[in-house]
Amino acid sequence: MIYDIVVSRHEDPKSWFWLRGADGAARALAAVRHQMGLTQAQIAGQLDMDRTTVLNMEAGRNPAVNRFISLFNWMGYDLIAVPRGARVTVDTRANADADAAP
């Protein structure tokens, strides 16, 4: 599969994340928080939760989220997290990589 993710020219490019495995969401959450320059306490305060909840989510200690992602992965689907406003194009052809070769 080919994921073509384009962010508007007027914004700084932001990372996108492939949520694979039990710790995929945890790594993505921590990386996005760091990119935005936020602390765990700031996120917790904004969402009215304890900082330890954010800490546990970033450490992959959220069984419901881990099972959710693992179930999709087991059924042959990948989940991706893209910046809001990004354009995503998915090429589902099985041999897309071979077609792209010169």
Image: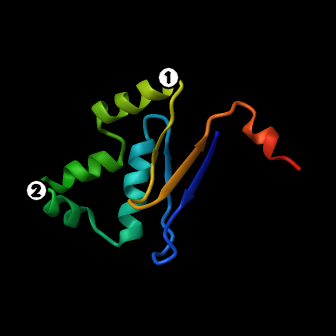
Please report the residue visible at 35 percent of the width from the left and 63 percent of the height from the top: 33
Q: Residues within 10 Å of mark 2 (few under 14, many from 20)?
A: few
Q: Is residue 72 left or right of residue 48?
A: right
| Near-viewer residue (21 or 75) | 75
Q: Mark 2 belongs to which amino acid?
A: Asp
- Residue 74 image label: 1
Q: Dot 1, crowdedness within 10 Å: few (<14), some or many (≥20)?
A: few
* Residue that extends furthest to the left in the rendered view of this protein: 48
Mark number, residue 48: 2
Q: Up-down: is 80 above or below 33?
A: above
The kind of secondary structure element at disc 1 is helix
Q: Amino acid at mark 1?
A: Trp
Quadrant location of residue 61? top left
Q: How is the image coloured?
A: rainbow
Q: Residue at x 75, y 33 (%)?
A: 95
Residue 74 position, x and y percent, is: 49, 22
Q: Residue at x 54, y 25 (%)?
A: 76
Residue at the bottom extreme, as displayed: 10
* Quadrant of the rendering where the N terminus is positioned: top right
Which residue is painted at 14% across and 53% down in the image? 50
Q: Describe the element under mark 2 as helix, strand or loop.
A: loop
Residue 27 at x, y percent in the picture = 44, 50
Real-space Cα separation, disc 1 to disc 2, in angstroms: 33 Å
| Residue 38 vertical placement versus 26 (above, below) | below
Along the line of sight, the residue nearer the viewer: 60 or 65: 65
Chain-order first, disc 1 or disc 2: 2
**Residue 90, numbered label:** none
